[in-house]
Image (tube, rainbow, N blue to C red):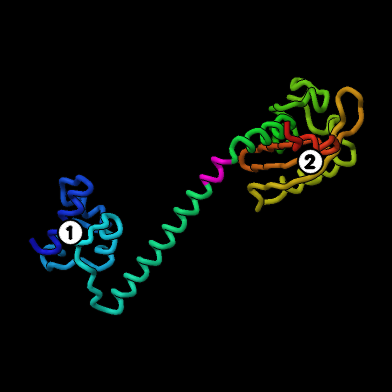
Amino acid sequence: MNSVQKIISQVMSHYGFRHKYQVAKYFGVTPQALSTWLTNGNIPSRHILKVRSDIHDTELPEPQGSSIEENKTVIDYLINENVRLKNKVSKLNARIHNLQSDDIKDDLFERINSRSLILVGRLSDGVIKEASGNWYESMGYLETDLINHRYDEGFFHPEDAEKIKNNQMNILKSTGIKESRFSTIRRWKHGQNGTYVMLSMVWYIDVDKDQVEIIAKPIDLDLDSVFVKN
């Protein structure tokens, strides 16, 4: 058995392949190219390196670099393989770190998210179509107090409502903006006592869908309480 046949047999045995086209797919070549290897008795060095890297068989023949171009190809392969392995190790380390800190993160995120206020509405007319989160506990509104109402129906401070309206008009007039994301701080009237509460707001705008999504959190509360451990 020549070296090409031996390598192909090793690959078929290691991966349980039964057909030569499966081997060709493994190498990323056509079945015709595989037949050429068998005819010429030679496999390009980069493919031998792949087999040695994947199967770790010390009996496989050493790759023979026959030209500067082929040597360059081998070097490129080794560089790419090194980068791939580094990325894999980095991802594994990140996963280990995440697993170790998931309990702490979950507890923190749960407390932060419990204060989130979410609105979904139309860009064109500012009508609120969905509302969720701690609106009643934080701001004194039931969800039904918000849905199907416009944002400028007394919810925002008049000065802030004017800024929002100007921004809305600029986006609608623009022909180049399809999506936008930005953060603002706006004053929202409390539904029970009428005072204005400062909200940190992140806006996600999709012009084609005529949709605005807002995630907000009150920022004039005691933020330190969110991070206090039980």
| Of 125 and 110, the residue lying toward us | 110
Position of residue 29 in the picture relative to residue 205 (left or right): left
Q: Residues within 10 Å of mark 2 (few under 14, many from 20)?
A: some
Name the magenta segment's main secondary structure. helix
- The number of callouts visible is 2
What type is the residue that disc 2 sits on? Ser
- Give the side of residue 183 with respect to residue 207, left or right: right
Position of residue 30 measured from the top left corner of the image (x, y, whole percent):
22, 57
Residue identifier under label 2: 200
Residue 77: horizontal and vertical position, in percent?
A: 35, 66
Percent position of residue 205, x then y = 67, 42
What secondary structure is found at the residue carrying circle 1?
helix
Where does residue 150 sit, x and y in percent of width and height?
Answer: 78, 30
Mark 1 neighbour density, 10 Å: few (under 14) some (14–19) many (20 or more): many
Q: Under tag 2, what secondary structure?
A: strand
Amino acid under disc 1: Ile
For the point 83% across and 40% down, the residue is 186
Mark 2 or 1, nearer chain start? 1
Q: Is residue 81 magenta?
A: no
Image point 52% across, 45% down: which residue? Answer: 96
Could you say which disc has been placed on residue 100 in the image?
none
The region drawn magenta spans 95-100
Identify the residue position indicated by label 1 in the image: 7
The residues tagged by marks 2 and 1 sit, at their Cα atoms, a distance apart of 62 Å
Write the residue at 77% across / 20% down.
142
